[in-house]
Image: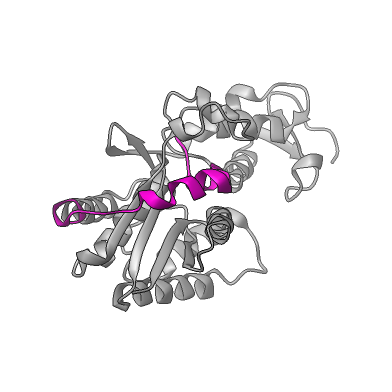
Amino acid sequence: MSTIHLTNGDVAAESLRSALALAGRDDRVQPLRDDLAVGPLRGVDDAPYVRADFWERVTADTQRDFVREFREQAAVLDGLSNDTANLVVWHAESASDQLMLRRVCYLVRNSPQRLNEVRLSIADLAGRADPQAWAHTRKDHATSVGMFARDVLQAHLPDAAPISVLRISRLALEWQEVKQANGETRRWRDNTFTNGSFAELDTLILERASDDWQPAARVAAYVMTAELWYLASDSIVLWRMRELVTQRRIHLRGDANEWRSLELRAASAPCSPQ
């Protein structure tokens, strides 16, 4: 029987493909492209518009057809649930990875014998010269599969193990509960999901804003490495910065699509011409 490996996002998928190639395996890798830790979830399994509308608002990218992208994602998920291949869900300790796991369990709950998992943790990064070394100091241990180098993933290929029927049922139920709760953000702490708000990100941005212009990327890095109990992406942080500009709480200057040129300042001082 064939095997399909599932990852949260393209970065993780590319690393896993390389790991499989090094191991001489040609298993299929299927990325699921949605950061489920942020934005509305109620109705997400019924229509693509729930998530498409949210990400269209976040990115402000008029060139992307988010409805089409999420329709394609829905077709992928339908295909996985109707397929007969074994599934291996790769997940680490981020809220988004854990939500992906629960969504997959919900979708294939009627054929639980197909489901397997590989668990990764912050301990798998320890002691390595890794570009994600900042993660080692996080008390929330938030890590995603995309952080791990291909040699680490290759070493974990033999760790794929079946998920028990009882656990699949529990994880599927948790997915339904999280969807119903429908928070703005979702934290993963002590094996439990709790809701948060985008105001928490806004507070962190405002903490770093001063009367002097500074690189917006520096502020974004502070927010993205904060112990939020989920991983905040650069696109989410930039969206919150734009929202704070709209609220006249900060100023931005430069190209909002180019972190190197973008600068940020508190709104406590008048904004000079852009």
Which residue is rendered at x = 51% and y = 26% of the image?
136
Whether residue 42 is visible here, answered yes or no, is: no
* Magenta stretch, overall SS: helix
Query: What colouring style does the render use?
Result: one colour
Q: Quadrant of residue 40?
A: bottom left
Which residue is rendered at x = 34% and y = 46% of the image?
183
Which residue is rendered at x = 63% and y = 58% of the image?
60
75 up-or-down from 246: above or below: below
* 189 relative position to 65: left or right: left
Task: Using the image as rendered, state which of residue 211 and residue 78 is in the foreground.
Answer: 78
> Considering the image in quadrants, where does the C terminus appear?
top right
Q: How many marks?
A: 0
Task: Using the image as rendered, state which of residue 249 and residue 77 is in the foreground.
Answer: 77
Image coordinates of residue 6 in percent, x first then y, are 42, 61
Which residue is rendered at x = 47% and y = 66% of the image?
30
Magenta-span inclusion, residue 236: no
Magenta-span inclusion, residue 161: yes
Which residue extends farthest front? Answer: 24
Task: Using the image as rendered, state which of residue 270 and residue 19 is in the foreground.
Answer: 19
Residue extent of the magenta highlight: 142-168
54 up-or-down from 205: above or below: below
Image coordinates of residue 246 in percent, x first then y, are 62, 43
Image coordinates of residue 34 in percent, x first then y, are 47, 58
* 263 relative position to 6: left or right: right
Which residue extends farthest left? Answer: 166
Image coordinates of residue 158 in percent, x first then y, are 39, 51
* 270 relative position to 48: left or right: right
> Considering the image in quadrants, where does the N terminus appear?
bottom left
268 up-or-down from 120: above or below: above
* 186 relative position to 272: left or right: left
